[in-house]
Image (cartoon, rainbow, N blue to C red):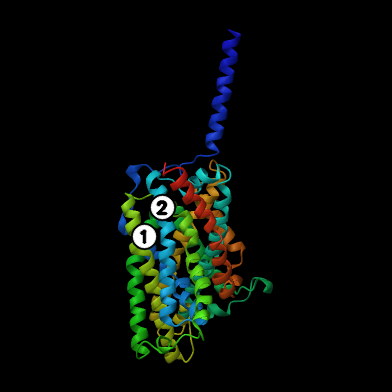
Amino acid sequence: MNIDRINDVNSDQKNNLTEEFSSSLYSEDLAAIPLSKRTWNTWNYAALWISMSLCIPTYMLASSLIDGGMNWWQAILTIFLGNTIVLIPMILNGHAGAKYGIPFPVFARASFGIKGANIPAMLRAIVACGWFGIQTWIGGFAIYLMITAWIPSLSNLPRIFPESFGLETGPAICFFIFWLLNMYVVYLGVDSIKKLLVFKAYFLPLSALALLYWAVSAGNGFGPILSQPDKFATSSEFWDFFFPALTGMVGFWATLSLNIPDFTRYAKSQRAQVIGQIIGLPPSMTMFSFIGVVVTSATVIIYGNTIWDPVVLAGKFENKFIVSIAMICIAVSTLATNIAANIVSPANDFAHLAPSKIDFKKGGYITGVIGILIFPWKLIADPSGYIFTWLIAYSSLLGPVGGIMIADYYFLRKKC
């Protein structure tokens, strides 16, 4: 009888330990998506990449290459090659998400261990928080320019932040408004993100083509940039610049190649995520970068100087309605890209630290708070040093993490 009681006590202890262990590893947000709820088709994944590609950093991407000495077609070709290369790990890592319905940090458990998976997850989350803050500032500043077109006094509000913050009151208010809009989308959940991406995939390409039409018409052609030769004296100088530049283009989406299971876990089939990404990523990145080159070349003719920043360009339009439409386009573009690229992943990554205490929404809110604390208005003051050097270089360092996951999944575990 005593033995039976001891066994009962041991059994209860084991069950309690099992439940405690399971709760520390499991949550509904991290659990595998059942087949009945995997609703993303080919068009959803194409829309995902069309939506994420149409953003301010993509528009300005070719400028860093042209400033380095390339002509327009060399820059565009480098961008296309970089995105074609990064497409390979995107599809390979996306396979596990589509097959098992699991997010990136859970997939990383197989190759890095249950606790070790937090290392690549946090490395990915740090980059996302940096991008989130910057994109939120861009979207907020677009709102600020739109409002000041109608209410100029907004730019003359008394300063409420210490001068060391480097933050004016008007832009700060608009930044916080746009930040709240991002947090509201997080509150609505993943399904709202899918709808936002589809809306942007229809809305923004039309806006981009309208901007291209304006540039060609107002600039009397494709402008001086398309006729300028490269600045390399020898072929060796070109290749010395080309390979680091190509690495940078690969690094632009290197972080997404890690956490792509966060999206492919919703795929109806492997074909949906593969074909959708092929259709969406390289073509849209290349086309929008090309539009950035053409529009910028037109600014030389129209305004007498080169304007690479579309937010600054839109602010130069005299018609208030045109300024408002342009800024709405920029805000919508930034919102969709920010949520998909910079919220979904860190939300899952932070949730993986303590699944029983942090869900997807709380992880998104944590990302939002960190996005404010990094002072993005100061970081974006030097975009060449931060966006195109530090963040992309840091992202490229995550390549070995992706390589380990691919090798483990395909060669050691045979996709099982």
Indicate whether 306 appears above or below 2.
below
Q: Is residue 224 visible?
A: yes
Q: Residues within 10 Å of mark 2 (few under 14, many from 20)?
A: many
Q: Quadrant of the N terminus?
A: top right
Going from N to C along the chain, the mark reached first, 1 or 2, is 2
Q: CA distance from mark 1 to mark 2?
A: 10 Å
Counting from the top left corner in percent of width and height, residue 173 is at 55, 69
**Mark 1 touching mark 2, by CB under 8 A?**
yes
Mark linked to residue 94: 2
Residue name at image x 41 percent, y 67 percent: 53
Q: Quadrant of the C terminus?
A: top left
Q: Is residue 265 visible?
A: no
Residue name at image x 33 percent, y 77 percent: 209
Say which amino acid is labelled 2.
Gly
Q: Residue furthest top?
A: 1
Counting from the top left corner in percent of width and height, residue 92 is at 41, 53
Mark linked to residue 222: none
Q: Secondary structure at mark 1?
A: helix
Indicate whether 297 appears above or below 191.
below
Counting from the top left corner in percent of width and height, residue 369 is at 58, 58
Say which amino acid is labelled 1.
Gln
* Picture mark count: 2
Residue name at image x 56 percent, y 27 percent: 16
- In the picture provided, is 172 more to the left or to the right than 81? right
Q: Residues within 10 Å of mark 1 (few under 14, many from 20)?
A: many
194 or 400, which lies in front? 400
- In the picture provided, is 271 more to the left or to the right than 384? left
Counting from the top left corner in percent of width and height, residue 269 is at 32, 49
Q: Which image quarter: residue 205? A: bottom left
Dot 1 corresponds to which residue?
A: 277
